[in-house]
Amino acid sequence: MDDSNRVIVEAWNTVLYDKFCRFKHLLVEGLSQHSEAAFERCRYPQGARVLDVGCGFGDSTLRIAARVGPAGEAVGVDCAENFIRAAETQARKDGVDNARFIVADVQSGDLRGPYDHAFARFGTMFFEMPGAAMRNLRKALKPGGTLTQIVWRRREENPWLHEAELRVREIVPVVSQEETDQVHCGPGPFSMAGPDMVSTMLHGAGFECITFERYDCDICIGGDVDEAIEFAMALGPAGEIIRLAGEEGAKRKPQVIAALRETLTTFARVDGIWAPSSTWFITATNPA
Ligand SMILES: C[S@@+](CC[C@H](N)C(=O)[O-])C[C@H]1O[C@@H](n2cnc3c(N)ncnc32)[C@H](O)[C@@H]1O
């Protein structure tokens, strides 16, 4: 059994799961804009069997289940058991019968194919060996099946993550993933931002007809600036720098809060803190 993602899986099942629970309201609401726009484009037909990759709380899996109807099936896969248990609880609560959830490492696990399509909303940027994961995904698709991924574009176009990271880097000593024994999230949110690298990787994994569509929208990162600061200090590259710095990170929190207040206030609107975001919708087809 390939355990190259062991540290990453542990991070997603523990510290990152806890942080995602804390900010679930912002994440689910904010990221649904992207998935709804992507669903309008992929239009999964009634009766299709669709895999939701790195499904997290499973809200997009449940939306897919509604689209494919009772004759179809949506399967959410995640490496973190805690996310899968939360997704199962939500599906039961909502009375959804055609959604199923499995715990597996997408890079090497049995994904229980074959699927007509696979979908991922920000679920494919954290693999230690992304090429192997893409190959494993392709093998789980029927001939002619498609993979649609939503990933962040370059960091400069996502200032809510990048500017927070730059401010934190000025204040907190950066400890690299290799220098620490702490669990970490893996390659990170911008690891699939480069179309040349990603299209080469997808070709290498056996996909064809690879397309990139840019999709931009503003997202709410806090009801007010205090919440936006908490959010930035918990998640994304800024949050990871603070966490991996341990005591040094904790000690510098007052300075970080002051710096982030200055930066994030620039995104304030009457209805909260809204920042521009930019993504790729990447589609790829398993050859027929
Ligand atoms: C940024 S979250 C996105 C969650 C969800 N798709 C959403 O949009 O809210 C990334 C997800 O990928 C999962 N993940 C990371 N590495 C994985 C792997 N190797 N196999 C399966 N899931 C993985 C994490 O546990 C996490 O739920």
Image (cartoon, helix red, strand yellow):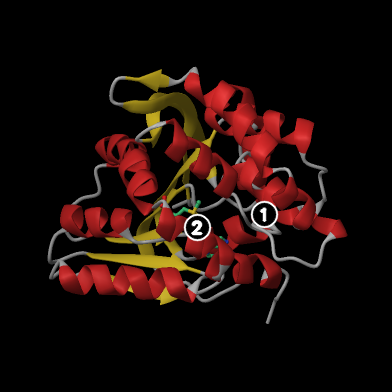
Label 1 residue SS: helix
- The outermost residue toward the right is 179
Whole-angstrom CA distance, mark 1 to mark 2, is: 28 Å
**Residue at left 51%, top 43%?**
230
Mark 1 or mark 2, which is nearer to you? 2
Tell me if I can see residue 132 in this picture: yes
Give me the disc on residue 131: 1
> Would you say 79 lies left or right of 217 here?
right
Viewer-proximal residue among 203 and 263: 263
> Would you say 70 lies left or right of 223 here?
left
Where, by quadrant of the figure, is residue 243 drawn?
bottom right
Can you give x and y, in whole percent of width and height, for residue 214 in the image?
Answer: 46, 25
**Residue at left 59%, top 49%?**
125
Amino acid residing under circle 2: Lys
How many marks on residues? 2
Viewer-proximal residue among 73 and 179: 179
Viewer-proximal residue among 236 and 40: 236
**Residue at left 24%, top 59%?**
62
In the image, is residue 178 above or below residue 193?
Answer: below
In the image, is residue 254 above or below residue 245?
Answer: above
Label 2 residue SS: helix
Give me the disc on residue 6: none
> Would you say 90 lies left or right of 10 here?
left
Can you give x and y, in whole percent of width and height, for residue 143 in the image?
Answer: 42, 57
Can you say which quadrant of the picture contains the N terminus?
A: bottom right
Query: Which residue is denoted by mark 2 in the rendering?
Result: 19
User: Mark 2 or mark 1, which is nearer the start of the sequence?
Assistant: 2
Tell me if I can see residue 106 in this picture: no
Amino acid residing under circle 1: Gly
**Residue at left 82%, top 61%?**
180
Neighbourhood count class around disc 1 (C-alpha, 10 Å): few under 14, some 14–19, many 20 upward = some
